[in-house]
Amino acid sequence: MNNPFFSEIKKNFGFGCMRLPMKNGKVDIEQTKQMVDMFMENGFNYFDTAHIYIGGMSETAIRETISQRYPRESFVLTNKLSTHCFNSQEEIRPLFQEQLKACGVEYFDFYLMHAQDGAIYEKFRRCKAYETALELKAEGKIKHFGISFHDKADVLERILTDYPQIEVVQIQFNYVDYDDASVEGRKIYEVCEKFGKPAIVMEPVKGGSLVNLPEEAQKVFDNLNSGMSNASYAIRFTGSFPNICMILSGMSDMAQMKDNISFMKDFKPLNDIEMKAVQEVCQIFRSMSMIPCTSCRYCTDGCPMNILIPDLFSCYNLKTTFNNWNQDYYYSNVLTRENGKASECIKCGQCEEICPQHLKITEMLEDVAKEFEH
């Protein structure tokens, strides 16, 4: 892992602000301040947000915990243009100004076209979103222009061919998705290399799935007797590739922050023994039938039946894969007490249109219903 591209980034580890600590339905500002301070004190300075994260609260939390407390030149801030937030070129600049104001800054170091796939890319082209962002860069309101990406490698190749001005690509990259045929982690990384675009990693621990492992997989790492956390193997795997310029971790409490800093402050890539262990864990995961949801929650905002889709999928995975039999109570008495049940899905398809993982959500909800609503 190296960073010859962007001198303003101090270290190659970033604070992803999509899963900040919460308290009574709001971002826990005091705990977030403590996390930001620890992050900065240990030499890290890269923060990542989007207008849609935590229902808009991520941006304002950045203003309260970072922008109002640290000199602007001391931190690097990435924001994104999300498809949910505009439907015409005329709406982009007012939205951008709103984002600046929410974050309490006068410019963004990086501005990414968010969650690009084949369909979303066509909308961005129709609305001249890329051209507008490049104009904002020429005006000094954006330092670096890029995309975050969720689709097949051939779609990425098309986008990078159409817009060589792209400086950086944010990709989903972890050891489970690396050779997965649906995500194409390896192929997407190789496209970035082919076009000379440094890659930013999102979902290195796959929404937490690579932290809480099934028993058989956990034994593989326990046998190493290294004292390292499951998160360390996942994050250090991604950092073992030379074209990775930044790894994001969506830390939601101080314990996660302390753990991540412990192995990223003086980064060391996986050694041969650790890499072999990761490959064994991958084989175990491939033998299971987990729903590969990363809990980004893009699907929940527009659900007409108010179904907590990622939570139901997580509940399903815990019961069917991790043998957690308390999930029946959790499903009936917590997740669906005031929200929709899986069986109440009307198959409108909104969730599938926005899902970065391209999951067949309506079909998977049928499986969830069969499991919990006998």
Image (cartoon, grey):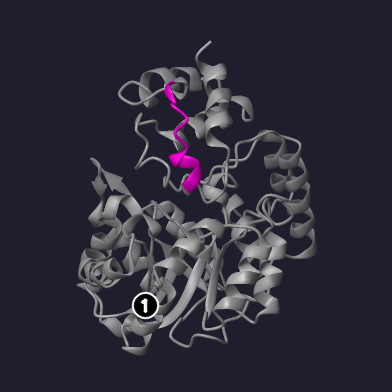
The residue positioned 50% from the left and 29% from the top of the image is: 315
Q: Is residue 184 magenta?
A: no
Q: Does the magenta stretch include residue 351?
A: yes
The residue positioned 30% from the left and 46% from the top of the image is: 22
Which residue is more in the foreground, 305 or 287?
305
The percent position of residue 324, horizontal first and vertical second, equals 56, 24
When the figure is inspected, residue 216 is found, relative to residue 149, above or below; the finding is: above
What span is in magenta? 344-353
Residue 59, located in which quarter of the rendered image?
Answer: bottom left
Which residue is more in the foreground, 351 or 79?
351
Q: Which residue lies under the disc numbered 1? A: 132
When the figure is inspected, residue 281 is found, relative to residue 271, above or below; the finding is: above
* Residue at the limit of the structure toward the front, as seen here: 126
Q: In the shown orientation, is residue 200 left or right of residue 136?
A: right
The percent position of residue 156, horizontal first and vertical second, equals 62, 67
The percent position of residue 350, horizontal first and vertical second, equals 44, 41
Q: What residue type is labelled 1?
A: Thr
Q: In the shown orientation, is residue 136 left or right of residue 223?
A: left
When the figure is inspected, residue 369 is found, relative to residue 240, above or below; the finding is: above
**Few, some or many C-alpha atoms within 10 Å of disc 1 (few <14, some 14-19, many ≥20)?**
some
When the figure is inspected, residue 285 is found, relative to residue 165, above or below; the finding is: above
Which residue is more in the foreground, 163 or 137?
163
Instruction: Say whether residue 115 is visible.
Output: no
Q: In the shown orientation, is residue 324 left or right of residue 72?
A: right
The percent position of residue 363, horizontal first and vertical second, equals 57, 30
The residue positioned 42% from the left and 64% from the top of the image is: 15
Instruction: Say whether residue 279 is visible.
Output: yes
The residue positioned 53% from the left and 76% from the top of the image is: 168
